[in-house]
């Protein structure tokens, strides 16, 4: 009788041990689920919705890729905005310089040509702004420096004694597409003039069937005019002390050209601002879509914290009860052995 009882108790102990092991495994899995926030076994755990989950995750990846591209474009339009603001400030400084140096007596000791050279190089430095290794003012030729040398090294454009409105008028007209001649001398001749000027060629897809152009070219009318205006002022110094009246007339002409440049630059800045707004709206649209996709994905693969917590509480209670029963069984077994 003792042997039969011992065998029965051993079987019960083994069963309880297996039960404790199973409960422990289930408890660990529930804790893992609570920690990760996801249902167990990946796609197996949501087998009836696995195809929908895969489709949603694919759409999420696409939306996030487009968002990254739009962010890159936005960073560049911000660089354009900052650069344009700096050049507008320099153009304003140039206007002040021309006003101060209009009087030949003052200009004779103010080194106006040196001031002009400094402004030209500051403008040139801004036109060589880069986003990483990309020259942002080079159109689609972004690996190529948009400038041909240093702006202050440009040779004399308007010789001594030149008369505004007679010897020259507006030689730096904007260069239209597909016109290889009369390229502004400051642009890099290695580049394709079409690509420098055609800003519509610089853009990106912001959705599968939607493309936005953006960009500001070194061949923009505002840049051409501001450089031309400073060159007119610089070259006018050849008449300083030789023909002061013509010097003053040439400075006035340069100032007028500068006013045109400022108008063009502000128009370009406004256009760039509109592109910034468009990109911002697209990014907001993608952000809303991404949020909705994450909610739908979460509805499929995310575990219910309350349900998991309840399950854990139940498993812990069952495990404690199993330990208690096992303990009592072991005590009974010892008594039987002592008998």
Image (spheres, rainbow, N blue to C red):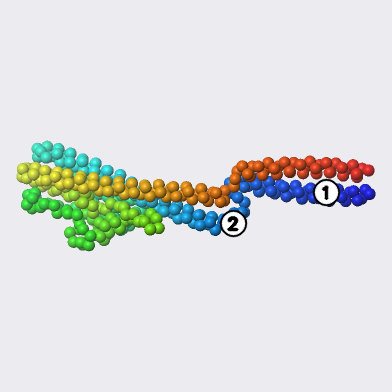
Task: Look at 5% across and 43% down and name the residue there.
Answer: 245
Counting from the top left corner in percent of width and height, residue 143 is at 32, 57
Q: Are marks 2 and 1 in contact (CB under 8 Å)?
A: no
N-term-proximal mark, 2 vs 1 = 1
Residue 186 percent location from the top left of the image: 22, 54
Between residue 264 and residue 116, name the one nearer to us: 264
Badge 1 element: helix
Query: From this viewpoint, is residue 190 visible?
Result: no
Closest to the observer: 209 or 189? 209
**Residue in the picture at 14% in, 39% down:** 99
**In this rendering, which labeled residue sits more in front, label 2 or label 1?**
2
Cα distance between the residues tagged 2 and 1: 39 Å
Circle 1 residue: 12
- Given residues 326 and 334, the one toward you in this image is 326
Horizontal side, residue 289 vs residue 52: left or right: left
Can residue 156 be seen here? yes
Crowd rating for badge 2 (residues with CA inside 10 Å; few <14, some 14–19, many 20+):
few
Q: Nearer the viewer, residue 256 or 158?
A: 256
Residue 48: numbered disc: 2
Q: Secondary structure at mark 2?
A: helix
Count of numbered circles on the image: 2
User: Which quadrant of the structure image shows residue 313?
Assistant: top right
What is the crowding at mark 1: few (fewer than 14 residues within 10 Å), some, or many (at least 20)?
A: some
At x 21% / y 58%, what residue is drawn? 176
Q: Position of residue 169 (x, y in %)?
A: 11, 52
Image quadrant of residue 339?
top right
Residue 13 relative to residue 203: left or right:
right
The residue most toward the front is: 48
Q: Which mark is residue 91?
A: none
Please provide percent x and percent y for residue 243: 5, 45
């Amino acid at each position: 009788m003792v042997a039969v009882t011992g065998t029965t108790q051993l079987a019960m102990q083994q069963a309880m041990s297996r039960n404790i092991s199973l409960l422990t495994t289930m408890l660990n899995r529930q804790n893992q689920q609570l920690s990760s926030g996801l249902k167990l076994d990946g796609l197996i755990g949501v087998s009836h919705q696995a195809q929908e989950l895969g489709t949603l995750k694919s759409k999420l990846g696409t939306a996030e890729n487009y968002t990254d591209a739009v962010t890159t474009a936005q960073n560049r339009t911000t660089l354009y905005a900052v650069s344009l603001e700096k050049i507008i400030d320099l153009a304003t400084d140039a206007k002040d310089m021309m006003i101060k140096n209009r009087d030949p007596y003052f200009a004779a000791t103010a080194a106006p040509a040196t001031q002009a050279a400094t402004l030209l190089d500051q403008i040139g430095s801004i036109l060589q702004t880069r986003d990483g290794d990309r020259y942002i003012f080079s159109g689609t030729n972004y690996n190529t420096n948009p400038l041909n040398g240093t702006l202050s090294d440009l040779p004399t454009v308007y010789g001594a004694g030149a008369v505004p409105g007679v010897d020259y008028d507006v030689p730096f007209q904007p260069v239209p597409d597909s016109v290889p001649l009369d390229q502004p001398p400051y642009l890099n001749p290695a580049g394709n003039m079409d690509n420098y000027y055609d800003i519509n060629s610089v853009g990106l897809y912001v959705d599968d069937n939607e493309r936005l152009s953006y960009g500001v070219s070194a061949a923009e009318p505002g840049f051409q005019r501001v450089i031309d205006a400073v060159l007119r002022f610089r070259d006018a110094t050849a008449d300083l002390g030789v023909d002061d009246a013509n010097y003053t007339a040439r400075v006035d002409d340069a100032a007028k050209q500068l006013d045109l440049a400022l108008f063009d630059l502000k128009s370009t800045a406004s256009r760039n601002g509109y592109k910034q707004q468009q990109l911002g709206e697209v990014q907001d649209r993608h952000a809303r879509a991404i949020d909705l996709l994450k909610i739908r994905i979460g509805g499929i693969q995310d575990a219910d914290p309350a349900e998991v917590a309840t399950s854990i509480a139940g498993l812990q209670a069952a495990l404690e009860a199993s330990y208690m029963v096992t303990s009592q069984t072991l005590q009974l077994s010892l008594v039987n052995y002592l008998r």
